[in-house]
Image (tube, helix red, strand yellow):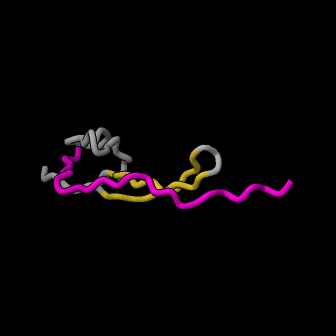
């Protein structure tokens, strides 16, 4: 089985209840399972389907702050 590059996607989330953040995460190219991967750990295989993964030349980005939530009118 040939190693394939993971698919990178972004998702937004709320940090501390008021800071809008954007996070980049990786998925298996075969089964689309979200991988537990980051700059300190890159799995060699997908834990769901067993697809071999190739993280060479991967540049990891930190979460980006997009702004703040507007306070709700009371």
Find the residue positioned furthest to the right. 74
**The image quarter in which residue 61 lies:** bottom left
Residue in view at x 23 percent, y 55 percent: 58
Q: Nearer the viewer, residue 37 or 70?
A: 70
Q: Nearer the viewer, residue 8 or 29?
A: 8
Is 61 part of what is drawn in magenta? Answer: yes
Residue in view at x 21 percent, y 49 percent: 53
- In the visual, does 20 lie left or right of 54? right
Find the residue positioned furthest to the left. 2
- In the visual, does 11 lie left or right of 38? right
- In the visual, does 4 lie left or right of 30? left
Q: Position of residue 15 (x, y in %)?
A: 57, 46
Is 7 part of what is drawn in magenta? Answer: no
Q: Nearer the viewer, residue 13 or 26?
A: 13
Q: Tally the numbered discs.
A: 0
Relative height, residue 24 to residue 50 (above, below) = below
Q: Position of residue 43 (x, y in %)?
A: 24, 40
- Looking at the rendering, the stretch of residues picked out in magenta corresponds to 50-74
Q: Position of residue 44 (x, y in %)?
A: 19, 42
Relative height, residue 53 to residue 70 (above, below) = above
Q: Magenta stretch: dominant SS?
A: loop
Q: Position of residue 5 (x, y in %)?
A: 22, 56
Residue in view at x 27 percent, y 40 percent: 40
């Amino acid at each position: 089985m040939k190693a394939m590059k993971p698919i990178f996607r972004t998702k937004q989330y709320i940090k501390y209840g008021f800071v809008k953040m954007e996070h980049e995460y990786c998925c298996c190219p075969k089964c689309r399972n979200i991988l537990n991967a980051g700059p300190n750990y890159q799995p060699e295989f997908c834990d769901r389907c067993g697809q071999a993964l190739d993280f060479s030349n991967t540049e990891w980005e930190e979460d980006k702050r997009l702004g703040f939530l507007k306070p709700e009118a009371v």
